[in-house]
Amino acid sequence: DTGVSQDPRHKITKRGQNVTFRCDPISEHNRLYWYRQTLGQGPEFLTYFQNEAQLEKSRLLSDRFSAERPKGSFSTLEIQRTEQGDSAMYLCASSPGGGSYQETQYFGPGTRLLVL
Amino acid sequence: QKEVEQNSGPLSVPEGAIASLNCTYSDRGSQSFFWYRQYSGKSPELIMSIYSNGDKEDGRFTAQLNKASQYVSLLIRDSQPSDSATYLCAVNNTGFQKLVFGTGTRLLVSP
């Protein structure tokens, strides 16, 4: 399977703990995106990378959130001092990054986070 | 006003019927439009993309776009129980890479 992969698939943590999620995009996809989805809502954009450069961050991404994509391959999303409001599905997507606006984003299976 | 609006449903149709899902968007600069299907507990899966005014057909699915009315729709012909899912409309603006999603319409196809 050469789709987008995410790890872990589920994470339960206590409030105040730090968590880190990993995303491996489709091979040779230059663009990588992070979204967050809560129950009954559509995914909300958090941030995106073009290769290793983080080009856009949503205002949803507070100082407790940080994302990296070293070497332009996999990406990590870290949440520090988790809060109960961080409980959500964290989705990663990737796209080829050829410059056209006609790009399809392909989603990974998501990481479901529950903060107790 | 939300950027992308969808009726949350549920939209209930009998098996074999046509399901019509609608979406409106507020940003006139939007250039790319996508329909994703999402089963409960799963991630979004691309169904259709459309970029130009008019209809685009792919199997049982037809996407329709009217940029003047800022309206995009998805028709599902010969609906099957396996089509029961939430359908997310997503919009992309030229120059911005993020997708803006609606809240999704839940479709229920009864046997």
Image (tube, helix red, strand yellow):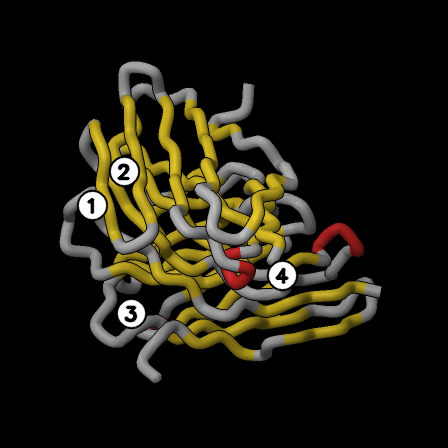
Dot 4: element: loop
Between circles 3 and 4, the one closer to the viewer is: 4
Outermost residue toward the bottom in this view = A1
Q: Quadrant of the N terminus of chain B?
A: top right
Mark 3: amino acid? Gly
Between circles 4 and 2, the one closer to the viewer is: 4
Q: Please name whichever residue, A11 or B81, is drawn nearer the observer in this view of the structure.
A: B81
Q: Please name whichever residue, A83 or B103, is drawn nearer the observer in this view of the structure.
A: B103
Q: Please name whichever residue, B97 or A79, is drawn nearer the observer in this view of the structure.
A: B97
Q: Residue at x 54, y 67 (%)?
A: A110
Dot 2: element: strand
Between circles 2 and 3, the one closer to the viewer is: 2
Residues under numbered marks 2 and 1 in contact, where contact means CB atoms less than 8 Å apart: yes
Mark 2: amino acid? Ser
Q: Of callouts 4 and 2, which one flags the residue occurring earlier in the amino acid sequence?
A: 2
Percent x, y of residue A29:
24, 67
Residues under numbered marks 4 and 2 in contact, where contact means CB atoms less than 8 Å apart: no
Mark 4: amino acid? Ser
Residue B32: mark in rendering: 2
Q: Which residue is mark 4?
A: B40
